[in-house]
Image (cartoon, rainbow, N blue to C red):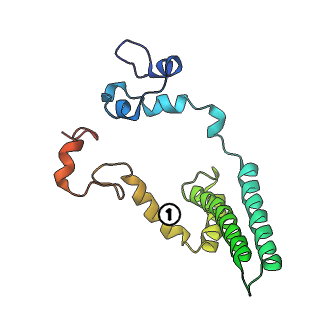
Amino acid sequence: MPSFLADGTTIAAAAEMRAPLSLRKIATLPKEQLPSKKDLKDAIPAHCFEYSTVTSLSLVVRDGLVIGALGYAAWNYLPTTDLGLAEYAAWNVYWFLMGTALTGWWVIAHECGHRGFSDNELLCDVVGYPLHSLLLVPYFSWQYSHHKHHAKTNHMLDGESHVPPGRSFAGMFKGMHGES
């Protein structure tokens, strides 16, 4: 069932009629006025939830070609001795580009761990394991610990990151997670 605002309009309809709410306004909305997970999912086109093995594998290959081309260029064209300011700048550009490309592989490996790469679990593992290994992150142990991490993600008091400095701050967040 869609979430309704006080005037009876749905949140989705209200979003189309007026400017976005400020973060402060959103953070202080009553729970009943917030969209449900179903409302959010319904707002996303259905094709965004469809797997494409061809597209997924093509992204692995594309990033591999970029990584290989950058490595080839660095090996053959970037000097390693008698470095001046221009050479240091060139290496910094290389490091930035290679880091960006390797982050692409990290994102793909991460999605394999979440089973978001493919609807085929074996394919996720076959792609995720070598990518994680190349990035020096053990795949299956990372997958296990990362699942534990997501179990409490965004929980103000029990999460692993962005947690208030102590339980004395708990009163500020009463009611945010259904606690009284």
Q: Is residue 104 above or below residue 140?
A: above
**Quarter of the image holding residue 29?**
top left
Q: Is residue 130 above or below residue 4?
A: below
Total labels: the figure holds 1
Work out whether residue 130 or residue 96 is closer to the camera in this orientation and state it.
96
Give coordinates of residue 156: x percent, y percent. 30, 49
Give coordinates of residue 31: x percent, y percent. 32, 30
The image quadrant where one finds the C terminus is: top left
Q: Is residue 7 above or below residue 90?
A: above
Image position of 57 (left or right of 12): right
Identify which residue is drawn at 63% across, 49% down. 119
**Quarter of the image holding residue 163?**
bottom left
> Mark 1 is on which residue type?
Gln
Crowd band around label 1 with a 10 angstrom C-alpha radius: few (<14), some (14–19), many (20+): some
Identify which residue is drawn at 24% across, 58% down. 165
Work out whether residue 89 or residue 170 is closer to the camera in this orientation and state it.
89
Image position of 1 (left or right of 75): left
Give coordinates of residue 93: x percent, y percent. 70, 67
Q: Which residue is mark 1?
A: 143
Farthest residue to the bottom: give it.
81
Farthest residue to the right: give it.
76
